[in-house]
Image (cartoon, rainbow, N blue to C red):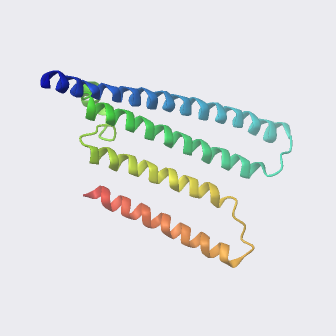
Amino acid sequence: MKNIFEKILWNSRYLTLLAVWSCVVGMALLFISSAFDMWELLLEFIDVYFFGHEIEGFHIILVSHVITAVDDFLLAIVLLIFALGVYELHIDKIDFARNDPAAGKLLQIESLDDLKDRLGKVILMILIVAFFKNVLHVTFDDPLNILYMGAGIFLVSLALYFGHKAGEH
């Protein structure tokens, strides 16, 4: 009875494949969706700059859409790293990635702390991109807004500094 229970318990790790495949699907959807958004933005850009159709505040719209796409691409990368990490930690090592010099160390996960560290760095970048996107819509008609902007930039810089320092060890 004990052996049967342990075998079922050990094989239950294969349920993590649901998370792996869900992340791969989500990653693909984000990449494809963002690529289509960029395509539509390109067509709009051509329409505005080559055919002279005016759109109020198009430059801000353009930058905002590009930043949103970068944000979506970073989230897709988080899903990729998470999927590969969960697979390597719970199922098996990916031999193909270990033999491919192009894989680098980013996608090779050795421990749960390694996975958390890699995810944390990419999530920090997502937060920085989101902050940058929100900065585009800040008005500087109040001195307090300028102070908040400076404090926000300082905190983002501090987070990057500590993230870099943590990665050195």
Front residue of this view, candidates 81 and 50: 81
Image coordinates of residue 12 in percent, x first then y, are 28, 26
Q: Would you identify the image quadrant in which residue 101 lies? A: top left
Q: Residue at x 28, y 44 (%)?
A: 112
Depth order, front residue of 44/10: 10
In this rendering, would 166 be left or right of 72? Answer: left
Q: Farthest front residue?
A: 1
Direction from residue 166 to residue 47 in the image, left or right: right
Total tally of numbered discs in the picture: 0
On the picture, is 33 further left or further right than 76? right
**Residue drawn at 43 percent across, 67 percent down:** 158
Q: Position of residue 88 (x, y in %)?
A: 28, 32
Q: Is residue 44 above or below residue 151?
A: above
Q: Position of residue 107 (x, y in %)?
A: 33, 37
Which residue appears farthest toward the bottom when viewing the image? 143
| In this view, 113 is above or below 12 | below
Q: Is residue 126 above or below residue 138?
A: above
Quarter of the picture holding the N terminus:
top left
| Residue drawn at x 64%, y 57% as measured from the top left | 134
Decide which of 26, 2 is in the foreground and name it.
2
Q: Quadrant of residue 31?
A: top right
Q: Residue at x 24, y 40 (%)?
A: 110
Compared across the picture, whether 61 is left or right of 56 comes to left
Between 125 and 44, the one lying in front of the other is 125
Residue 169: image location, x then y, percent: 24, 58
